[in-house]
Amino acid sequence: MPTPSLLIVPARFKTGKLYSQIPTSGAGDFTVTRNTEARRFDSAGLIASVASGIPRLDYYTSGGVTGCPALLVEPAATNFIFPSNLSGSWSFGSTVSATTSVAAPDGTNTLAFNSNSSGNTEFTISRVNDALASGAVATFSCFAKIKDANVPVLQIVLGTSLQWSPNAIFANFNLASGTISAGTYTSARIENYGNGWYRCSVTATSTVGTGTNRSFVLQLQTSPTATREAKATITTGTGMYLWGAQLETGSVATSHIPTTTGQGSRSADAILVSGAVSGSIGQTEGTLYVELDTRNLFETTGVFNIRSATNNYVMIYMSNVARRFSGLINAAGTSVTVGQTANGLSAGIYKMALAYKSNDCAFYVNGTLIGNTGQATMPTGMTEVNLGQDATSPTNRIFNDRIRAVALYNTRLLNAELATLTTP
């Protein structure tokens, strides 16, 4: 297998810089721009803050277990709900009280929400918000952990039939099994963050305009129910741990953005290298390789590309239309799709390679040839490499997931080499 001309396995960094393993001259070191702090899952298994401009090495693996770090790249986001620890201006049902208790996913003390009475009683924690525009796709999420084995179900309810589409949305999150049981949602997710904590989220479309209150209600249940239920049969002192409420536009819950007395925001991650790196880019032939750890296959984004200032590019791309990856080449304004994966990809690890050469291009994913083309014209003058951005609009369609490794080769690898390189 030839040696790559550029290689990054995320490991070494400083403020504003992600270092490449190849080349060692510094010509392949990526500039990292993000003018706010942001959070990642650190090597100790906690959600931790990093300062502005610091690349986020995220150690999350399935089940909330720490593993090898990957580069977390995300678009800008705002958390419209405050405070995120569910205190202060949140409203509690008449039989609910809150006490400081166990460590939250970020290591700070979180709140335990407890019942003050027994029997078939109301157990609700709620908040209203008026910041979303009509037609906005938004995701509400929070972290939850079982406090009492007989109250394992968190029911999230989004407003009334007049506030969201689809109408009267709710979902039951079973924290004992880590599953979603029953509901009227179109899109909902539960993610294991370890130590008993799960992040539960529901996505919907607002049907009312800015300035109109829409409610977010958390209800505790002893078992999943097929209806929205404000009451549950519980005993005094039982309850659940809750933390990290977040309301944001978009179809996935991004990394946690804490809030206190007002909204909180995170800037996008911009990660690129240009100029001297052109010596690592094959101008007439070459190969792009990327390894992803994906959980958020819901947005249309660029993944990895090389490009010129005049919009010639070679790019690996993700489409939310059918949840699939594509290999694209644009030369002299003519774009060609080398190959596309099948629709409906699931979350997981993907290894992809896009090889280009006049009359001989191929796209491999996880050891399988996805497509090839005899495209004759190759892009020219490519001087920039982007991670997690769209080649046609680098500041838009930003990737929203984890990149484990990227590499460039300044030759078109053989098909057998492409298959070997991308085999899981």
Image (cartoon, grey):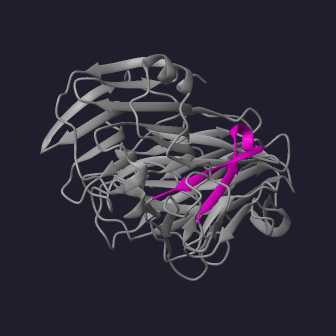
Q: Which quadrant of the figure contains the N terminus?
A: top right
Residue 238 pos. (x, y %): 84, 52
Q: Is residue 224 left or right of residue 321?
A: right
Q: Residue furthest bottom?
A: 261
Residue 16 pos. (x, y %): 54, 73
Q: Is residue 267 above or below residue 420?
A: below
Res. 284 image quadrant? top left
Closer-to-camera residue (405/275): 275
Residue plotted at (67% across, 61% down): 12
56 inside magenta stretch: yes
Range drawn in magenta? 55-74
- The number of numbered badges drawn on the structure is 0
Residue plotted at (87% across, 57% down): 237
Q: Is residue 339 above or below residue 135?
A: above
Answer whether residue 385 is visible to the viewer in this image: no
The main secondary structure of the magenta stretch is strand
Closer-to-camera residue (68/422): 422
Q: Is residue 293 left or right of residue 290?
A: right
Closer-to-camera residue (33/355): 355
Residue 280 pos. (x, y %): 43, 50
Q: Residue furthest left?
A: 333
Q: Is residue 253 above or below residue 152?
A: below
Answer whether residue 389 is visible to the viewer in this image: yes
Residue plotted at (49% across, 77% down): 35
Res. 43 image quadrant? bottom right
Residue 341 pos. (x, y %): 38, 24
Closer-to-camera residue (94/16): 16
Q: Which quadrant of the figure contains the C terminus?
A: top right
